[in-house]
Amino acid sequence: MKSLAELKAIRDKAQAEINMRKENPNAAKVLVGMATCGIAAGARPVLNAFVEEIAKRGLKDVTVTQTGCIGICQYEPVVEIEIPGEDKVTYVKMTPEKAVKVVNDHLVNHNVVTEYTIGTATR
Amino acid sequence: MRELSLNVMDVAQNSVRAEASLVRITVEESDKEDRLSIIIADDGCGMTEEQVQQVIDPFFTTRTTRKVGLGVPLFKLSAEQTGGSFDIKSKKGVGTTTTANYVKSHVDMTPLGDINSTVKILIQCNPDIDFVYTCTTDNGSFSLDTRELREVLGDVSLDTPDVLEWITDFLEENTKEIYGGA
């Protein structure tokens, strides 16, 4: 059974790394639309896929968080990626599989996955 | 919504928007009594009586990005379609409590689904808010209180990957325990 003692060990380990993580202005942001529309369209597994893939690759400067509805409910699940110094990219109709590709291509290699973006979807 | 846990995630966002510092999510399930209750209680900004009436209306929202607000109406529907009940109690400046009661065996009962994932995501995405999640079945009960975790963690944030993994495992193990390994 998980115990608070175990949590203490996690704290001690995390404290050693904490300075690197804190408020990094260069951190990339992954914003998953999690209003009623996003949730109903399947945003939760998409968010989980981002978190898992980012953890698997050990990416440090990425935060994954939820955001509200940006008004394009028909394209949910919507994910926005903001990397400082680069244009914001909006991905639409996301799935956990697409999320893995976006992490690898966009967050790691800085190549936008054009076929998943809103620009391609509305064309 | 395919799972009630998704309704919970949705409605709990309202508590976040209401600037709550503590959100209590309670799930009580009893096969013996054929019922499931979900209670979401926050200490956020609360609503006036008039506003409480408005949130039940699908065509009311405080958003400006779209004209409908379906979070609360969908949650209400999910409960009432099983012959259960739904209630919101709110007081301006004190907080809001939303209660949904379900008749489990009803043909229109939506499965609870992955409530642990909902709790984890809420903690992960709102590391500055405290959550108390309590789950009770015929076999027992357990709680996760982020205030207790915070005490142990000190200045280590709740959204640290290793901490989230601990939370996931904690929820999973305890759920197994009170659902009799099912």
Image (cartoon, coloured by chain):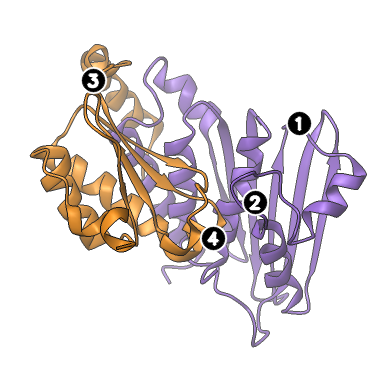
Chain colours: A orange, B purple
Q: Amino acid at mark 1?
A: Cys
The residue to which callout 1 is attached is B45
In space, the residues marked 4 and 1 are separated at their CA atoms by 24 Å
The residue at the far left in this view is A109
Residue A14 position (above or below residue B37): above
Label 2 marks a residue whose chain is B
Q: Please name the residue that numbered disc 3 is placed on.
A: A26
- Circle 1 residues within 10 Å: few <14, some 14–19, many ≥20: some
Which residue is label 2 attached to? B26
Q: Chain of mark 4?
A: B
Residue drawn at point x = 73 percent, y = 65 percent: B76
Residue B34 coordinates in the image, percent (x, y): 70, 77
Name the amino acid, label 4.
Answer: Ser
Which amino acid does the dot numbered 3 rest on?
Answer: Asn
Where does the N terminus of chain B fall, quadrant-wise?
bottom right
In the rendered structure, find residue B5 and report the number of the disc placed on it: 4
2 vs 3, front mark: 3
Which residue is outermost to the bottom?
Answer: B107
Q: Nearer the viewer, mark 3 or mark 4?
A: 3
Left/right of residue B117 with respect to residue A103 in the rendered view: right
Q: In the picture, which quadrant includes the C terminus of chain B?
A: bottom left
